[in-house]
Image (cartoon, rainbow, N blue to C red):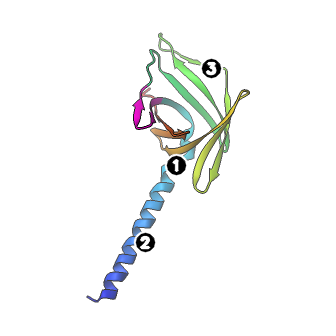
C-alpha cells in the first residue's frame, strides 16, 4: 500500500471522528426535555461535590414554550402530596454558537445559567464556576 493511501485513510478517519463528536455534542442538548420536574443531585465547585441536606425533597419545575418559560419550586409534603410555590421565576432560552443559556429574571434580580447537558433524565447547569447536577425524580 502506498503512503498516499495511508494518508487518505487517516484523513477520512479524522473527518469521521470529528463528525461523530460534533453530532454527539449537538444531541446532548435536547431543549424540549427541560419541561417538567428536576431534583438537585449535587453541586460541584472547586473540585468538591456538595449534596443537599434536606428532610423533604424540593424540585425545580420548568414550564417552557420555547424560547420562554417559568420556573417554580415544588416540595413533597409528609403526607405524600406536592406543594407548589406560587412564585414564578420567568426565563428565556438563548442559543449562542450552538450553546444554550437560561436567562432568568425575577422582580429582584437577573442571572444566567449555561446548559452543559440535557436529556430525558439528566440536567447540568453552570454558573460562576459551579455546576448544578439534576436528575428526574422517581415518581
Q: Quadrant of residue 70?
A: top right
Which residue is under mark 2? 15
126 sits to left or right of 17: right
- For disc 3, the neighbor class at 10 Å (few under 14, some 14 to 19, many from 20) is few
Please identify the residue farthest to the left as the structure is shown: 1
> Dot 2 lies on which element?
helix
Foreground residue among 8 and 69: 8
Label 1 Cα neighbours within 10 Å, binned few <14 / some 14-19 / many ≥20: some
User: Which residue, as the protein is rendered here, is positioned at the far right?
Assistant: 107
Which quadrant would the N terminus be assigned to in this image?
bottom left
> Tag 2 or tag 1, which sits nearer the N-term?
2
| Screen quadrant of the C terminus | top left
Residue 104 lies within the magenta run: no
Which mark is in front, 3 or 2?
2
Q: CA distance from mark 3 to mark 2?
A: 50 Å
Task: State the extent of the magenta-drawn residues as a range.
Answer: 40-51
- Residue receiving disc 3: 85
Foreground residue, 111 or 90? 111
Image spot of residue 123 (x, y percent): 49, 39
124 or 44, which is in the foreground?
A: 44
Residue name at image x 52 percent, y 49 percent:
29
- Cα–Cα span, label 1 and label 3: 27 Å
Residue 29: which disc? 1
Look at 39% across and 71% down and name the residue there.
14
User: Secondary structure under badge 1?
Assistant: loop
> Relative to 97, does residue 107 appear above or below in the rendering?
above
- Asked whether the beta carbons under mark 1 and mark 2 sit within 8 Å of each other, the answer is no
**Rendered image quadrant of residue 69:** top right
Position in image of residue 103 (x %, y %): 66, 40
Amino acid at each position: 500500500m502506498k503512503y498516499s493511501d495511508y494518508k487518505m485513510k487517516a484523513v477520512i478517519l479524522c473527518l469521521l471522528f470529528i463528525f461523530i463528536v460534533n453530532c454527539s455534542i449537538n444531541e446532548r442538548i435536547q431543549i424540549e426535555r427541560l419541561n417538567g420536574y428536576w431534583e438537585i443531585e449535587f453541586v460541584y465547585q472547586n473540585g468538591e461535590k456538595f449534596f443537599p441536606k434536606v428532610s423533604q425533597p424540593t424540585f425545580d419545575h420548568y414550564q417552557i414554550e420555547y424560547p420562554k418559560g417559568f420556573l417554580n419550586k415544588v416540595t413533597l409534603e409528609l403526607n405524600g402530596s406536592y406543594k407548589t410555590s406560587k412564585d414564578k421565576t420567568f426565563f428565556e432560552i438563548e442559543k449562542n454558537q450552538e450553546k444554550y443559556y437560561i436567562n432568568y429574571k425575577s422582580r429582584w434580580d437577573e442571572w444566567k445559567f449555561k446548559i452543559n447537558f440535557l436529556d430525558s433524565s439528566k440536567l447540568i447547569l453552570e454558573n460562576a464556576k459551579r455546576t448544578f447536577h439534576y436528575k428526574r425524580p422517581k415518581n
